[in-house]
Amino acid sequence: MTAQPSGADEWRAAWTAALDELEMDVVAAEKLLSSNQPEQGLASGASWSPPEGIGPLPLDMRPRAEAILARQLGTAKAMAQAMVVNRRQAAMLARVESGGNGAPRPVYIDCAA
């Protein structure tokens, strides 16, 4: 078990900073989902872990932590749904491009005659 920072104020500040970081990640993911240019918001993909020696979460910060978790879960669900829609659109486009029968459409028409 890790020891919490030396003073109560430092302990609370460490957890506040950790929760702030988590919340900023959720906000970035939410903006990514709602943007028309998602490629501009690609994240590094690094996983989060609490800073070393931060100690247990203060009980009065639990509601904020639970709210952030709920937003994370909601965003993850929305991302999964967006991926399903994207796959369906890609499959539909593939069918349209192939003419629906699996045969590739001609790339060019030879008009030199």
Image: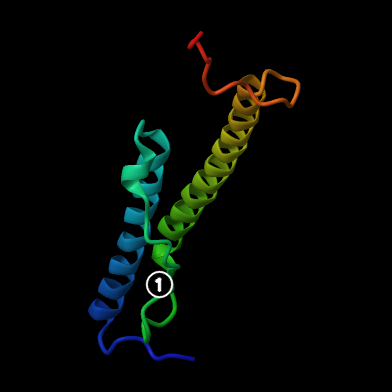
Front residue of this view, candidates 42 and 66: 42
Residue at image position (32%, 62%) is 21
Q: Is 2 drawn above or below residue 65 in the view shown?
A: below
Picture quadrant of residue 6: bottom left
Q: Is 109 drawn above or below residue 87 in the view shown?
A: above
Relative horizontal placement of residue 11, taking residue 3 as reference (left or right): left
Residue at image position (74%, 26%) is 102
Residue type at numbered disc 1 = Pro
User: Label 1: which residue?
Assistant: 58
Residue 104 picture location, percent across and down: 66, 26
Q: Is 7 drawn above or below residue 91 in the view shown?
A: below
Residue density around tag 1, few if under 14, some if 14–19, many if 20 or more, within 10 Å: few
Residue at image position (62%, 21%) is 105
Relative horizontal placement of residue 101, taking residue 73 as reference (left or right): right
Residue 54 picture location, percent across and down: 36, 81
Count of marks, rendered view: 1
Relative horizontal placement of residue 5, taking residue 61 as reference (left or right): left
Front residue of this view, candidates 80 and 51: 80
